[in-house]
Amino acid sequence: MITKQINNLLSGGEFPEETSQRELIETHISWVILCDQFVYKIKKPIQYSFLDFSTLERRNYYCHREIELNKRLTPNVYLEVLPVRKSQDKIIIGGKKGTIIDYAVKMNRLDIENKWINC
């Protein structure tokens, strides 16, 4: 995905569930979208000396690895990997319509007010 597609997802894209909130947090390797109940993390198509997310296949692989590794210690946070699709001019997380353009890690949103989260 590219920044323009992320903006399209934020402004008029489809998520697996209804959400009134779509807040973007950008890191050097990911776009993280905070929704009402869930968080979606999409890896940027980048390559550094210490990681390579440069292809769709690699991003899919590393999304699944992230779930596999992190679910051991936080089983109620990391949920699944969903395809990110483009159908006409709309970006959609999940579903079956459209061409797969990326993958997203779906997580439960944590209560940031609770300083002692028991995962």
Image: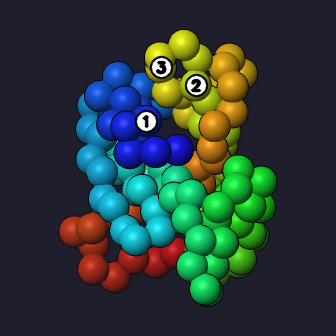
**N-terminal-most mark, 1 or 2:** 1
Label 1 and label 2: CA atoms lie apart by: 9 Å
Quick one: SS at disc 1? Answer: helix
Quick one: SS at disc 2? Answer: strand
**N-terminal-most mark, 1 or 3:** 1
Do the residues bearing badges 1 and 2 touch, measured as CB atoms within 8 Å?
yes
Do the residues bearing badges 1 and 3 touch, measured as CB atoms within 8 Å?
no
Q: Which residue is mark 3?
A: 90
Q: Mark number for residue 5?
A: 1
Label 3 and label 2: CA atoms lie apart by: 6 Å
The percent coordinates of residue 3 (x first, y second) are 38, 45
Q: From what the image shows, is residue 92 above or below residue 58?
A: above
**Label 2 amino acid?**
Lys
Q: Mark number for residue 86?
A: 2
Asked if residue 88 lies left or right of residue 18, the reply is right
Quick one: SS at disc 3? Answer: strand
Do the residues bearing badges 3 and 2 touch, measured as CB atoms within 8 Å?
yes
The percent coordinates of residue 110 (x first, y second) are 38, 63
Who's the residue at 47% across and 20% down the image?
Answer: 90
Q: Nearer the viewer, residue 76 or 30?
A: 30
- The answer to which quarter of the image holds residue 67 is bottom right
Label 1 and label 3: CA atoms lie apart by: 9 Å
Who's the residue at 46% across and 62% down the image?
Answer: 30
**Label 3 amino acid?**
Lys
**Label 1 amino acid?**
Gln
The percent coordinates of residue 68 (x first, y second) are 75, 70
